Amino acid sequence: MTFGQEWAQLRAAAAERTAMQIDSLPAEGGGGGGGKQLVVHRDDLGAIGNDAYDLLGRLTKDGDHARVSTFDAATALTNGNFVSGSGLLTVHDNWQMHLRTLLDACGQISNHLDYSKARHAKDEAKVEGDLTQISVLTKYMK
């Protein structure tokens, strides 16, 4: 057997194995261009991301509602030589620190879910492109 004959035989065997692998996938929802394999339930991600974004908006507006009046009251009490002034200022500072932490967390959740949706869409497009490329190569190998 010559090299050319052996090479042709190996190519035919590889093409047959590839065709069998592609054909063996389920027809409904299967790969090989028959349907999408990578599924992301964007409604679920979207709902959570929406809630995080809404919470972020409400916290930004309502969480800062009493900041100015609390700070002014703490300053007035401190200037009036009341010990509770420094205590109220500590409460104000702790509230601000925890509010910023919560706002950052909500923003990160919302941003991460937006990123996840976009990343999954890119991954899905890549997988579909790879499968299309395999099917085109299979045609050439026949």
Image: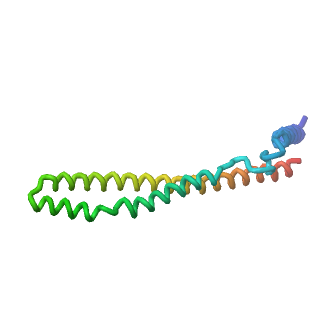
The residue positioned farthest toward the left in the image shown = 81
**Measuring 19% from the left and 59% from the top, which residue is drawn there?**
74
35 sits to left or right of 71: right
Rendering colour mode: rainbow
Image-based side of 28 in relation to 84, left or right: right
The image quadrant that residue 93 belongs to is: bottom left
Q: Is residue 103 visible?
A: yes
- The answer to whether 136 appears left or right of 55 in the picture is right
Residue 23 or residue 86, whichever sits in front: 86
Picture coordinates of residue 128 (x, y %)? 73, 52
Residue positioned most to the top: 1
Assign the N terminus to one quadrant of the image.
top right
The image quarter in which residue 66 lies: bottom left
Q: Nearer the viewer, residue 24 or 94?
A: 94
- Give me the residue at 10% from left, 61% from top: 80
Q: How many marks?
A: 0
Give the percent coordinates (x, y) of residue 98. 33, 51
**In this picture, is 106 found above or below 21?**
below
* Relative image position of residue 67 (x, y in whole percent): 29, 62
User: For the point 38% across and 61% down, which residue is it?
Assistant: 62
The image position of residue 113, as x and y in percent, is 54, 53
Q: Nearer the viewer, residue 19 or 36?
A: 36
